[in-house]
Image (tube, rainbow, N blue to C red):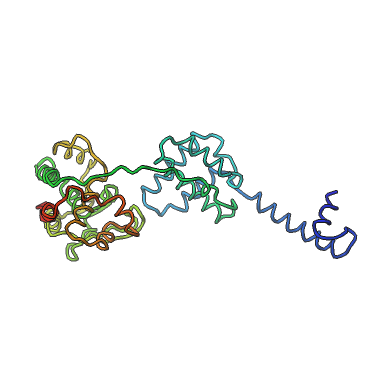
Amino acid sequence: MLVLELAESCGGACNAAGSLVRCRRAVRLGVEALREEEHSVPFAEAVAYTQRVKAHRAARTRQDIAYYMRRMMREVPWLAERALRSLTPQDCRRALEQAYTTPSQQRKARAIMSGVFSVGRRQGWCGENPVLQVEAPAVREQEIAPLPLEAVKRLVQTAHEPAHQAALPALGLMLHAGVRPQELTRLRWQDIDLEEREVCISARHSKTGGARHVPLSPPLRRLLETCAGEGRICPPNWRCRWQNLRRAAGFSSWVPDVLRHTFASYHIKHHRDMAALQLSMGHRDQRLLMSRYINLRGLSRQSAAAFWHLQL
């Protein structure tokens, strides 16, 4: 019955020479397709290989891959041993919803899981990326307002106190250069080019994996000239020092990225140069700047000018 079905599918009776040749070809192609379809690896092995492939990426990226995938396989026990090729969009959606409860976590995990399948496709372990068929959950971004000028002054004044002076260069780089907190912990004094008047953030230190050179404002350049040293810019025990500085300045709560938002908003209000701001922020385009970072509510031209002339 199978032979007859194959012969009919190939377009003729099974005793016709031409039909037999087509049958043999159909069997050979079918065996090759079946072998390719069955070639795969468990999801856990694909994750481990992805980590090796991305070993050159920034430390934060590597940590995110390890954390999100480890948690997913812990919360979804059946996932680790499933063949990558056998996973469907429904399986991926179920795993994401079971492992993570908030839309932001699910969105991040979805992006990382999609990366695992992309690596798997290049290795021939799956035919498609089923995660692309899973809708990314909508995340309602919280509006982050820049710090008012008085709050900025209070933070800088507190940093000048003897107990907090070691944190002053790092504070200046976040305020007047928009350096991300995670990038800041990896910066060294050799990354400050006082002659060219810029801070050089290499690709391995950048969150997005792209290098950028951020101009130093005159107040920031004078501060860094005064404090220049060796080794890391952040002093030892940086997290505690930074937290103590904020508390001493009267901040009972703190938004982690607020100084980067402050830098972007005061920059565009004073300089009015979106292209220059994009280069300093290290963004590929201006959409994220416009939609998330720039918040001019309550900012005046006078306060923006005062921000850039503030003695750090």
Q: Looking at the image, is 209 positioned above or below residue 182?
A: below
Residue 102 vs residue 160, the one in the foreground: 102
Please tell me which residue is depicted at 82% across the width and 60% down the height of the picture. Answer: 11
Q: Looking at the image, is 267 positioned above or below residue 235?
A: below
Task: Classify residue 169 as left or right of residue 45.
Answer: left
Task: Classify residue 44 as left or right of residue 151.
Answer: right
- Counting labels gives 0
Task: Classify residue 62 as left or right of residue 157.
Answer: right
List x then y, in percent, for residue 41.
59, 47
Please tell me which residue is depicted at 21% across the width and 38% down the height of the picture. Answer: 243
Residue 212 vs residue 66, the one in the foreground: 212
List x then y, in percent, for residue 18.
85, 65
Residue 89, image quadrant: top right
List x then y, in percent, for residue 65.
43, 45
Please tell me which residue is depicted at 17% across the width and 37% down the height of the picture. Answer: 251
Task: Classify residue 112 as left or right of residue 228.
Answer: right
Please tell me which residue is depicted at 48% across the width and 37% down the height of the picture. Answer: 97
List x then y, in percent, for residue 239.
24, 40
